[in-house]
Amino acid sequence: MKHSFLVAMPAFVVLTACLPYNPVESAAPPLSIPESFTAGDEVIAEGDSHIGVEPWWQAFGDPTLNALEERALGDSFQLRAGWARLSQARAVAEQAGAPRWPTVGIQLSAGRQRQVFGSAGVQEFSSFSASVPVSYEIDLFNRIGATATAADLDARATRDDVEALAISISAEVAEAYFNLVEIRQRTTLLESQLASNDIFAELTSLRFQTGQASALDVYQQQATVQGTRARIALLDAEVRVAENRLRAIVGVAPGGTITAGPQELPDLGELPSPGLPSTLLMRRPDVRSAQRRVSAADYRVGAAIADRFPSLRLQGSIGFGAPNLTQLFADVVWSLIGSISQSIMDGGRRAAEVDRNKAVVQERLEQFGQVVLTALIEVDNSITGERAQLANVEELERQYETIDSTLTEARNRYRMGLTDYLNVLTALVAQQNAQMSLLAAKRRILSTRIQLHRALGGTWTQRLAEPEPREVRDLNDDSETDG
């Protein structure tokens, strides 16, 4: 026995020392990260530790938008499904970690046996037993531990996925909300244009009656009025579609109440600081998720390598046994068995599993790099896009002023008989189109700002709490459904 121990101990030490694989805890992205964000040759901003701490939409100062965002984060079907996936991932992680602990059970048995002993006749026996079996695998090479850690990292990555989904949903809510506000503002603008066109039509008709305008002038202005009315006729449907888009995100059925909110698009505040690219990686939950999945895959490589080494299992039981119930607890019965198993030939299955997991690591690493690159590009595009949109709005405002002056001059010249009505009508249509273009440009700036907030991520999502699960109800249940 002593010699066996002396032989086994060095072998165990050698095998333990043959664990060359150390999984990566925090993978570095496979691409170079710029030191700062730039627009052309200009450095945009230095670091700011407060970026994304508070929900970004609060910067607009719109109580209606705030209420819709909070409702969406609580009632969105997409987000609630994400929370359910997180619960599944946590359960899987708990299952993966269960083998770290002994398995304990209880066994109760009772039996009656009849046996023939030839000339001795027939004898009958009774047997009763109660025992507690215990089994435990000693994790010599961290196979179980690595598997459990990988599952835990997957669960944490799923939490990051939920947070990334929350950011996306918050951006979708804002986009849908401001789209609705823009349609309402466009309605107000078209109604104002219609009123102005009606006045022009009346004035043109009066001038025609006094011989100062031609029938062509009247027809042209009437056509302008009719065109404006035709555009207004479509707006009710646009409002309904926009409201339903918002309802779909928030989780409200068609016809459900959607607060009206303001009738005009808000003014933009200052451009939020994007901070440093290096801090962006920690603010973006999708980046964190991709990074964790690299580590999870790497831990599974370690588990696959450990699976090629021997496994040590202990099995035992303690209990009682007797031929009758009255003597059941008289004698204690116990057993303890230790076993070591090692695969000698498996056709290369375990080696192939190691190779497969290493390939998964490479796949996850490349995906991680793509996510990081996408995050950096999204921020860069949003900053560049907002600056371009601001310049576009400034030019459109100057254009509108010029067209407005042109309309005034054309009207004055028309009154004096120095030009025909076509010049007035052309300037009027140009002015109204410029108003619409300016409104659309302001909406595009808002969209760019929303996308910038989305690209910057934020830590506010880490404060999100899981909702209570919904009750599964029978379709024939007449009780009121949730929501």
Image (cartoon, rainbow, N blue to C red):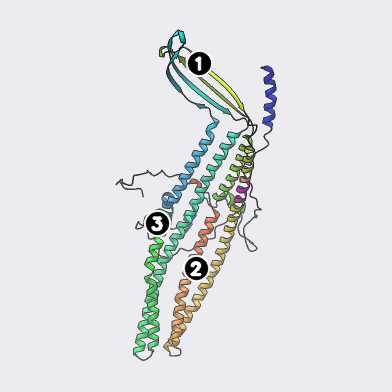
Residue 261 in sight here: no
Quadrant of the image for the N terminus? top right
Taking depth in this image into account, of 425 and 332 the one nearest to the observer is 332
Residue behind mark 1:
333
Q: Nearer the viewer, mark 3 or mark 2?
A: 3
Q: Earlier in the sequence, mark 1 or mark 2?
A: 1
Residue behind mark 3:
247
Circle 1: residue type:
Val
Circle 2: residue type:
Ala
The residues bearing labels 3 and 2 have C-alpha atoms spaced at a distance of 25 Å
Residue at (49, 75) in percent of width and height: 400
Q: Secondary structure at mark 3?
A: helix
Q: Secondary structure at mark 1?
A: strand
Find residue 196 and report its image quarter. bottom left
Taking depth in this image into account, of 70 and 297 the one nearest to the observer is 297
Find residue 46 and report its image quarter. bottom right
Q: Are marks 3 and 1 in contact (CB under 8 Å)?
A: no
Circle 3: residue type:
Arg
